[in-house]
């Protein structure tokens, strides 16, 4: 490893990062792909890395640091309130509460999730049932949020206005916006909404919200850089009522990630799924971070069946997680063959409390229903810390106190600065 002096605030080249860490450039590229380190791109497409992030990674690799896992809670409460639709098990609502916002009303259809909300927060006003049956007229709130499912719309001969979305859950979200007229609206969904139906579904949604009188912007948020030990990407839409001059801001990604090792320290005992004897024998052969390609060829063919001959990486099959990385995106079933989530060192699926830790729910947050129902609620939830970061942005927007230098806020039009050149810079720019 070369002894090179850098300012911790600097951006350095891939070559300098390689020299600093004493590993090959290919290794750093692989770490970037795994989410262990976050690369930037210059205007010419070259990779650069923040020195403070490389220093943290160096400490992690040497075993001299850790413990980044925490459930974030603001010191002060705000005066602002939130109405949330499709509240699920409360990940977004709890994150918003931790940020300092008050839950005014939550609407959720799933009976197990409703029971979970009421069990953990008896003081919350939780409406259990079909959102289509809820009358929002006469209600008012500073913020309205909702993770609406993205059903496709029928485009034949349609102008795709508000009424054309009728029959979809987005229509109910838009109706709530129309009836409550909040200052800020937030929608969240899977990354796939960007390309759903060729991008027309998202375009229609944004157009409807614009017609309702809101300036809207959207961004993909990567939770692994927002204090969540999980590689999960969510599309977040934020809108401001057009008569208000509030800025629109999104959480700024951090220069670190949180590993499973940090997240799963001293996790409570828990219920969870178990492998069959045959599957246990197969999964016991997989090393940490490995998957089906690490099996002997004969076992690969037997376990994979017809999938063995299909194209594509199939990297979720027979997948064991790694202690030193954030988890892969949690699904509703940790033992599902296509999206395996095996414990890093024990040959078993992640259990319920481990699932909850990875989604940054506190250990005190109890989930109702069967084991399958609990996995489903956690797997579908918005990570609590992601809700916190979004909530801090919303409070800053409403207070008019956005600080561009703060780790909490980043205006969407802000650009990554070009890296400063220095004398020992080895990359060809």
Image (tube, rainbow, N blue to C red):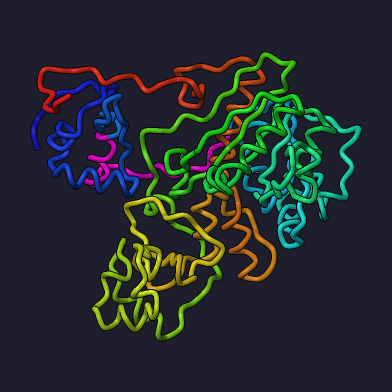
Q: Quadrant of residue 424?
A: top left
Residue 97 in sight from this viewpoint: no
- Asked whether, in this view, residue 391 is left or right of residue 233, the answer is right
Residue 157 position within the rendered picture, expressed as x and y whole percent measured from the top left: 74, 44
- On whether residue 64 falls in the magenta region, the answer is yes
Which region of the structure is painted magenta?
A: 54-73
Residue occupying image coordinates x 14% and y 28%: 427
- Asked whether, in this view, residue 366 is left or right of residue 300, the answer is right
Residue occupying image coordinates x 69% and y 31%: 185
Residue 233 position within the rendered picture, expressed as x and y whole percent measured from the top left: 49, 45
Quadrant the N terminus occupies: top left
Quadrant the C terminus occupies: top left
Residue 396 position within the rendered picture, expressed as x and y whole percent measured from the top left: 60, 21
- Asked whether, in this view, residue 25 is left or right of residue 344, the answer is left
Q: Looking at the image, is 10 positioned above or below residue 47?
A: above
Q: Looking at the image, is 384 positioned above or below residue 342?
A: above
- On whether residue 244 falls in the magenta region, the answer is no
Residue occupying image coordinates x 33% and y 37%: 38
Residue 408 in sight from this viewpoint: yes
């Amino acid at each position: 490893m070369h002894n090179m002096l850098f300012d911790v605030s600097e951006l350095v080249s891939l070559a300098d990062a390689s020299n600093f860490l004493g590993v090959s450039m290919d290794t750093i590229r692989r770490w970037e792909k795994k989410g262990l380190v976050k690369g930037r791109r210059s205007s010419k497409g070259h990779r650069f890395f923040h020195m403070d992030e490389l220093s943290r990674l160096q400490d992690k690799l040497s075993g001299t640091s850790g413990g980044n896992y925490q459930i974030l809670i603001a010191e002060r409460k705000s005066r602002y309130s939130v109405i949330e639709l499709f509240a699920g098990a409360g990940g977004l609502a709890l994150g918003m509460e931790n940020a300092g916002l008050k839950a005014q009303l939550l609407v959720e259809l799933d009976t197990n999730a409703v029971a979970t909300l009421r069990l953990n927060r008896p003081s919350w006003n939780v409406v259990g049932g079909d959102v289509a049956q809820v009358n929002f007229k006469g209600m008012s709130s500073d913020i309205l949020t909702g993770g609406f499912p993205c059903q496709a719309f029928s485009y034949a001969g349609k102008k795709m206005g508000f009424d054309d979305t009728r029959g979809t859950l987005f229509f109910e979200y838009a109706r709530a916006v129309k009836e409550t007229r909040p200052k800020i609206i937030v929608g969240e969904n899977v990354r796939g909404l960007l390309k759903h139906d060729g991008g027309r579904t998202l375009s229609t949604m944004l157009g409807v919200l614009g017609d309702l009188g809101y300036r809207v912007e959207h961004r993909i948020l990567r939770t692994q850089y927002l204090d969540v030990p999980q590689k999960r990407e969510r599309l977040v839409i934020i809108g401001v009522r057009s008569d208000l001059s509030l800025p629109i801001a999104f959480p700024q990604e951090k220069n670190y990630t949180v590993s499973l090792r940090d997240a799963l320290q001293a996790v409570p005992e828990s219920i969870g799924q178990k492998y069959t004897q045959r599957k246990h024998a197969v999964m016991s052969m997989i090393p940490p971070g490995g998957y089906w390609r690490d099996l002997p060829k004969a076992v690969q063919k037997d376990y994979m069946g017809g999938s063995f001959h299909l194209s594509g990486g199939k990297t979720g099959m027979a997948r064991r997680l790694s202690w030193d990385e954030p988890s892969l995106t949690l699904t509703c079933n940790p033992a599902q063959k296509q999206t395996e989530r095996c414990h890093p060192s024990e040959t078993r699926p992640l259990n319920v409390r481990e699932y909850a830790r990875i989604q940054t729910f506190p250990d005190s947050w109890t989930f109702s229903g069967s084991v399958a129902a609990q996995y489903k609620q956690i797997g579908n939830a918005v990570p609590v810390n992601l809700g916190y970061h979004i909530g801090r942005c919303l409070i800053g927007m409403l207070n008019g106190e956005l600080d561009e230098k703060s780790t909490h806020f980043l205006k969407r039009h802000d650009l990554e600065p070009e890296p400063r050149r220095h004398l020992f810079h080895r990359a060809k720019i």
